[in-house]
Image (cartoon, rainbow, N blue to C red):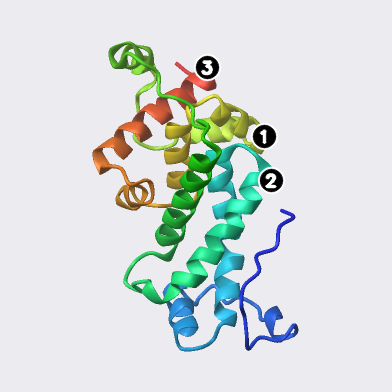
Amino acid sequence: MGFFVALPLRGASAGSLKRIDNPSVSDADLVRSVLSGDEESFTLLLDRHVAGVYSFVYRYLGNADDANDITQETFVRSWKHIKKFDTSRNFKTWIFAIARNASLDFIKKKKSVLFSKIEEGEQSLDAFLAPYVESPDLPSEVLARNDAKQQLEAALAKIPAGYRMVLSLRYREGLKFREIAEVLAEPIDTVKSKHRRGLALLRAAFGER
């Protein structure tokens, strides 16, 4: 992605940073290792989540350079506050919430609106979506027929940012609705509504009836 996250790994040598990540070791285990003094474990956490955080931030900002900067800021903030992390929580939820706050701070500083606005007229939107609301899950037939990543991304790009964000967190990152609600700081019923409408809009983007 072309960015570098400068982290204060005081005890890590260049060679030690090449330690291979063990998928069987959970994020919580890595955090506990960091808290016990193994700062290298934070680099493994970064490697695990940097792509997802970048994608998440990019969907907020829509600019690669800005997304690079805010992804870096996200991990710097998480490093600074890692001692406050509750290991009973989902680390991905925590880091994405930090990414969201960093993105919003960036937007406030720029004093510009980078979010797609939700269409006005809820009844009209519901009427438009009605033919497409069928299943609560991402339609496998859509993914089967449109397996090219660029096609799916193009369809997602047509969806307002609020809906696109929920679908991305749900299917790309595998978060539960309550976790998405925590990341976005929204009521869970709002998240579920955006999920339902987002799926309907995705079907509409693919021309499904």
Q: How far is mark 2 from mark 3, CA to CA?
A: 33 Å
Mark 2 or mark 1, which is nearer to you?
A: 2
User: Number of callouts in the render?
Assistant: 3
Q: Position of residue 93 (x, y in %)?
A: 40, 58
> Mark 1 sits on what residue?
150
Q: Position of residue 141 (x, y in %)?
A: 51, 31
The answer to whether 133 is drawn above or below residue 90 in the figure is above
CB-based contact (under 8 Å), mark 3 and mark 1: no
Mark 3 crowd level (few <14, some 14–19, many ≥20, 10 Å Cα): few
Question: At x 51% / y 35%, what residue is drawn?
Answer: 111
Q: Nearer the viewer, residue 136 or 78?
A: 78
Quadrant that contains the C terminus? top left
User: Horizontal placement of 15 versus 178: left or right?
Assistant: right
Q: Position of residue 155 (x, y in %)?
A: 57, 27
SS label for mark 2: helix
Mark 3 or mark 1, which is nearer to you?
A: 1
> Mark 3 sits on what residue?
207
Q: How far is mark 3 from mark 1, CA to CA?
A: 16 Å
For residue 65, the mark is 2
Earlier-in-chain disc, 3 versus 1? 1
